Image: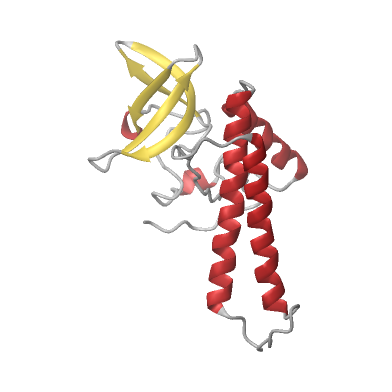
Amino acid sequence: MYDLHDRVTFSKDGKNIVGKIINIYYNLEKEVMVTLRSDDQKHHIVRMADLNSCETCSHKHLHGYQKPCKECKDHSHWADVKVILFHQLNGLTPTEQSCTFKLLEEIGEVMELIGKESGASGEIVGTERDLDLISHLVMEYMDVAQSSVTAVFTLCEKHNLDLETVLDQHEKKLREKGYLVWVTTKNPVPTAEIL
């Protein structure tokens, strides 16, 4: 299995290049592609099928694209992690202040919907949750997340911070707190669906 932040190798001009996966996507031919940052800080675009191996096993599985084989389920590097991708918005020129105001606005909309669901403003609360309201709430949470991500992009660019380092530090913190865990044979992974 290859996933974001895995260290992998591939051959180029007779040399073995080692690096970390920083992006995974489909090209126009529907092939799975990766952007790899090599140890010398150069970026390479490589077909997933051309990668040689990761540090733990040589099987070419990608979480969310294939079922893991039995051997990969036994490796501790297989993690049942779902990822939501947020874009850097290129139609805006945000500032720290505008990001903060937008984030507060979106949080206010979430709070308003939570209030409606609980009847805080005198609404009649049914016994079943209103699916339209819940769907609207989910979309507002997505807006909160996008606003937060936009603030991260804006601050990193303004203050010349390396986004990959920020992401690595954030993941490390989540793992240290136990919010994101590696799956081991003692904590078996659920079977993934084939898309």
Q: Position of residue 42 (x, y in %)?
A: 44, 15
Q: Vertical placement of 112 versus 150: above or below?
A: below
Q: Position of residue 114 (x, y in %)?
A: 69, 70
Seen from this angle, which residue lies furthest left? 29
Answer left or right for 194 relative to 163. Answer: left
How many numbered markers are drawn?
0
* Residue 152 lies in quadrant: top right
Q: Is residue 59 visible?
A: no
Q: Vertical placement of 109 versus 1: above or below?
A: below
* Residue 15 lies in quadrant: top left
Q: Position of residue 39 (x, y in %)?
A: 51, 15
Residue in the picture at 45% in, 48% down? 68
Residue in the picture at 62% in, 81% down? 129
Residue in the picture at 50% in, 15% down? 41
Q: Is residue 116 visible?
A: yes
Answer left or right for 83 relative to 35. Answer: right
Q: Vertical placement of 130 versus 177: above or below?
A: below
Residue in the picture at 38% in, 21% down? 44
Q: Quadrant of the C terminus?
A: bottom left
Q: Nearer the viewer, residue 72 or 1?
A: 1
Q: Nearer the viewer, residue 4 or 124?
A: 124
Q: Vertical placement of 7 versus 83: above or below?
A: above
Q: Position of residue 47 (x, y in %)?
A: 32, 31
